[in-house]
């Protein structure tokens, strides 16, 4: 029938039809909209920001990458990855990404939820009996550290772990938890809850507890589950809790800022972090950006579906209602400054802090963007509105070091300006 129709169609219409068909083959399959044009950024603009930070001794070395859902838009490496050994920073340098492990743990949890092996409303005590009847702090005296407890009115649930509203807090970023821990001599995830689950937001060991639950459900070590279900599917060849001996020459050293000067800590002969849901992974900028591109592609990577779009949306949506992300005030300035940017207004999803405004600087990430961090000043964000993700990796303590945060925001603003003008 098609051939018969073409024989009775004027030649000029046939020619146009053939031309349009050819164009469709070049831009996309016939009947479908052409793929969106990839965003563009000028490397020189971002290079200048990173190079200037190294020149001014803000950081000894840095690697950054920007991508849309299908393309790497920018990769840059500046400075040194090992100053004492005079080794220039490489784009494939391996970094300790610490709490950037948490979103990976959340992905693992969402996989189990999709498979029906876990529910957001499961009580944590179903898997970890010590959470049954966990008391909550009733009163606390900040002058003396004295406290009293009461029975909680509800149980800690999986959704509370994933949104950091469980009542657990890290002692380095919460004076109340720090003082209580000093009295009880327990781990931070064994302390009384600071508040009724779901009623406040604090940064703590919730993802560590989530990691234990994942291991109990799967019967596998968290490292094994990550490798089999996440790293292999995403081709993350340089991401693991341990750095193999043949890759140690790519591991960037850590520096501490002391009295305004950067002091290098030599790498040990072996790097084997404890396997935990809240930290310990080592990775590269290239690996982590592939992980983030999965989110830009609604849970897919190539032909493989990692998560359903609904799960991605849940992770990237407000899961704490009227609660807000509060500033976490340091108890140890040599380890961490107070954090995070966006405290007092931002929301939290499952595994991610969600930006609610960029009124101060429209070049910064758009509202609805989501992010998290690692304690050695490794940072990332995903901006669905602009269709990009970005990673910037440093290895400097203390966490939220003022100079590192300024570099982070300068990098973010430079990316935003490029996307506005590209």
Image (cartoon, rainbow, N blue to C red):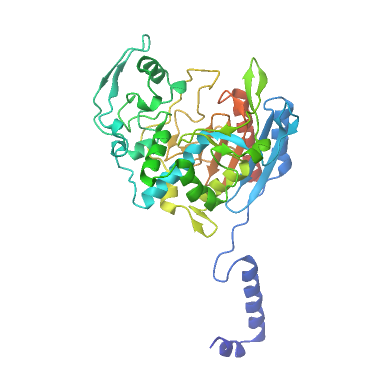
> x, y (%) of residue 345?
44, 31
Residue 247 located left or right of residue 357: right
* Along the line of sight, the residue nearer the viewer: 224 or 417: 224
> x, y (%) of residue 167?
35, 28
Above/below status of 90 relative to 70: above
Residue at 54% over, 29% down: 375
Above/below status of 168 relative to 314: above
Q: Residue furthest top?
A: 144
Q: Residue furthest right?
A: 86
Residue at 31% over, 31% down: 197
Residue 338 located left or right of residue 80: left
Residue 350 located left or right of residue 29: left
> x, y (%) of residue 58?
67, 25
**Residue 316 makes an appearance in the image:** no
* Along the line of sight, the residue nearer the viewer: 24 or 124: 124
Which image quadrant for residue 326? Answer: top left
């Amino acid at each position: 029938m098609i051939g018969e129709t073409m024989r009775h169609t004027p030649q000029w219409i046939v020619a146009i039809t053939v031309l349009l068909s050819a164009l469709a083959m070049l831009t996309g399959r016939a009947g479908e909209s052409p793929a969106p044009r990839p965003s563009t950024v000028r490397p020189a603009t971002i290079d200048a920001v990173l190079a200037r930070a190294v020149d001014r001794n803000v950081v000894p070395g840095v690697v950054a990458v920007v991508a849309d859902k299908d393309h790497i838009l920018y990769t840059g490496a500046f400075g040194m990855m090992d100053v004492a050994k005079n080794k220039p920073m490489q784009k494939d340098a391996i970094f300790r990404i610490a709490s950037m492990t948490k979103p990976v743990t959340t992905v693992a949890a969402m996989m189990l939820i999709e498979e029906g092996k876990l529910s957001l409303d499961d009580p944590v005590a179903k898997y970890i009996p010590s959470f049954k009847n966990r008391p909550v702090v009733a009163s606390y005296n900040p002058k003396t550290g004295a406290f009293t407890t009461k029975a909680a009115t509800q149980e800690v649930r999986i959704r509370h772990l994933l949104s950091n509203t469980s009542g657990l807090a890290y002692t380095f970023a919460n004076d109340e938890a720090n003082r209580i821990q000093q009295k009880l001599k327990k781990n931070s995830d064994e302390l009384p809850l600071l508040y009724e689950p779901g009623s406040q937001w604090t940064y703590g060991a919730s993802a560590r507890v989530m990691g234990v639950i994942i291991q109990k459900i799967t019967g596998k070590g968290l490292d094994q589950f990550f490798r089999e279900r996440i790293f292999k599917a995403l081709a993350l060849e340089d991401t693991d809790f341990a750095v193999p001996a043949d890759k140690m020459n790519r591991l960037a050293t850590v520096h501490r800022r002391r009295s305004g000067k950067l002091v290098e800590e030599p790498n040990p002969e072996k790097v084997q972090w404890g396997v935990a849901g809240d930290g310990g992974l080592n990775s590269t900028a290239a690996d982590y950006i592939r992980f983030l591109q999965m989110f830009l592609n609604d849970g897919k990577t190539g032909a493989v579906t990692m998560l359903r779009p609904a799960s991605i949306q849940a992770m990237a949506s407000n899961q704490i209602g009227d609660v807000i992300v509060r500033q976490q005030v340091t108890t140890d300035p040599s380890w961490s400054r107070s954090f995070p940017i966006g405290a007092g207004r931002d929301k939290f999803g499952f595994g991610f802090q969600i930006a609610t405004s960029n009124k101060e600087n429209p070049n910064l990430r758009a509202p609805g963007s989501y992010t998290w961090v690692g304690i050695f000043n490794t940072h990332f964000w995903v901006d669905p509105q602009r269709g990009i993700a970005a990673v910037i990796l440093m290895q400097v303590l203390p966490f939220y070091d003022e100079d590192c945060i300024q570099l982070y925001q300068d990098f973010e603003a430079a990316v935003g300006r490029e996307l506005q003008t590209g």
